């Protein structure tokens, strides 16, 4: 038995490589269930049959990881036509589209979402490099510049900071509402490399502060208030709960390359979350940033999203036990729950070596190196 286990461990890198080079069945299932033939990512079951710019942005990223250029172009074309008035170089995409009347569809909220804009620009930039398509790079550069212009603001004591959207997140003249999960460090790092004349390093620096200091007990909140005099804080109206947004904060940290200088600092900050997951062999649904209290158990997507994070801590036992639960239920999830499916695709694809981010933020999908 011991010899068999040693052989399996020795073969694991080869097995992961072989799996990462095959057709990605989870992506195919996601496509079949959530993406229309025109390229719209649909939040099935939502009251107004909605599509968000978030869904389009994640779809673009997964299509790139899957080397699925046909779907990538469909997603891009639908996004540009329906969310950006036909021109992504002229305006950032509206975040919400869906049923307006029983017989018509259109934009429900024109305010862009900065995290989606980041992911779209990032996917375009990396697609340009990996597929050798210059037009993607041009559009990525225009979007990146527009994000800086429309979705960042200099906050006293914090510096140039990404806001969740161009409008609606300045609570008063000295208080802003921020979302830590909107701040994937590897995307900012990549933009630092791609656009050296622009202040992306400043945005990266402030983002690392937001991620770290908004979690005083090691648990990230969905939203946090910032005031230069009060620092990061919460109120009864804007509480410290973390769940469907916050789970992405741990995912982004787990996806960072191991040799990124600030990864160890972020892992140390979120160590209480890792300990909680290890103790319960599951990810909590609700966490509370001020007290460190947790409640309930998160859906399958939460469990998948935590895999890269737990792997970074070296807790392979917990990761393995969680992975068994995922494998037993993944087919149902990828047919029924849009957002949980997104988290599941991120977590399982990274764990199965379908992609990784390097320390400069660049994307390395398995097909670009190992499958040729």
Image (cartoon, rainbow, N blue to C red):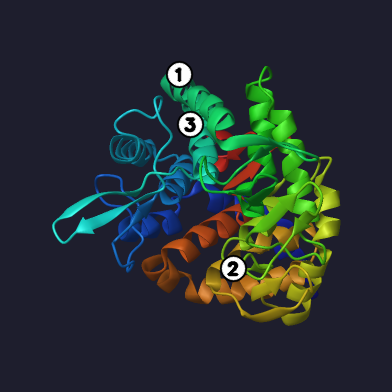
Q: Which of pointers 1 and 2 lies earlier in the amino acid sequence?
A: 1
Distance Cα–Cα, label 2 vs label 3:
27 Å
Q: Nearer the viewer, residue 142 or 175?
A: 175
Tell me residue 170's x, y (percent). 60, 47
Whether residue 365 is situated above or below residue 291 in the rendered picture: above
Q: Secondary structure at mark 2?
A: helix
Which residue lies under the disc numbered 2? Answer: 302
Tell me residue 219's x, y (percent). 75, 66
Q: Residue at x 47, y 22 (%)?
A: 132
Q: Nearer the viewer, residue 263 or 96?
A: 96
Distance Cα–Cα, label 3 vs label 1:
10 Å
Label pair 2/3, CB-CB below 8 angstroms: no
Pointer 1 local density, CA inside 10 Å: few below 14, some 14–19, many at least 20: some
Q: Residue at x 70, y 46 (%)?
A: 174
Q: Is residue 261 left or right of residue 52?
A: right
Residue 112 figure quarter: top left
Q: Residue at x 42, y 68 (%)?
A: 337
Which residue lies under the disc numbered 1? Answer: 134
Label pair 3/1, CB-CB below 8 angstroms: no
Tell me residue 145's x, y (percent). 55, 25
Which residue lies under the disc numbered 3? Answer: 124
Distance Cα–Cα, label 1 vs label 2:
36 Å
The N terminus: image quadrant: bottom right
Q: Residue at x 27, y 52 (%)?
A: 36
Whether residue 100 is situated above or below residue 144 in the rendered picture: below
| Outermost residue to the front | 173
Pointer 2 local density, CA inside 10 Å: few below 14, some 14–19, many at least 20: many
């Amino acid at each position: 038995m011991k010899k068999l286990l040693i052989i399996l461990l020795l073969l694991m890198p080869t097995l992961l490589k072989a799996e990462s080079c095959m057709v990605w069945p989870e992506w195919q299932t996601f496509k079949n269930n959530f993406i229309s033939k025109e390229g719209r990512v649909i939040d099935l079951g939502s009251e107004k049959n909605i599509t968000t710019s978030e869904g389009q942005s994640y779809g673009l990223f997964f299509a790139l990881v899957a080397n699925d250029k046909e779907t990538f172009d469909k997603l891009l074309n639908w996004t540009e036509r329906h969310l950006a008035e036909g021109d992504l170089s002229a305006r950032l995409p509206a975040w919400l589209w869906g049923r307006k009347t029983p017989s018509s569809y259109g934009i429900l909220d024109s305010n862009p979402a900065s995290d989606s804009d980041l992911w779209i620009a990032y996917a375009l930039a990396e697609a340009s490099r990996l597929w050798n398509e210059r037009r993607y790079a041009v559009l990525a550069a225009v979007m990146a510049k527009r994000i800086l212009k429309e979705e960042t603001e200099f906050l006293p004591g914090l510096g140039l900071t990404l806001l969740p959207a161009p409008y609606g997140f300045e609570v008063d003249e000295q208080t802003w509402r921020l979302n830590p999960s909107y701040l994937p460090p590897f995307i900012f790092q990549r933009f630092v490399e791609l656009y050296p004349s622009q202040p992306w390093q400043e945005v990266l620096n402030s983002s690392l502060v937001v991620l770290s200091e908004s979690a005083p007990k090691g648990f990230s909140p969905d939203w946090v208030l910032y005031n230069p005099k009060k620092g990061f804080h919460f109120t009864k109206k804007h509480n410290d709960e973390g769940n469907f947004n916050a789970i992405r904060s741990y995912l982004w940290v787990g996806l960072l390359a191991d040799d990124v200088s600030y990864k160890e600092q972020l892992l140390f900050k979120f160590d209480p979350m890792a300990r909680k997951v290890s103790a319960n062999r599951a990810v909590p649904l609700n966490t509370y940033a001020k007290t460190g209290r947790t409640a309930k158990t998160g859906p399958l997507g939460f469990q998948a999203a935590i895999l890269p994070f737990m792997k970074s801590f070296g807790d392979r036992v917990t990761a393995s036990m969680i992975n068994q639960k995922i494998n037993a239920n993944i087919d149902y999830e990828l047919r029924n729950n849009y957002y949980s499916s997104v988290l599941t695709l991120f977590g399982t694809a990274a764990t199965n070596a379908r992609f990784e981010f390097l320390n400069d933020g660049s994307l390395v999908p398995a097909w670009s190196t190992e499958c040729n």
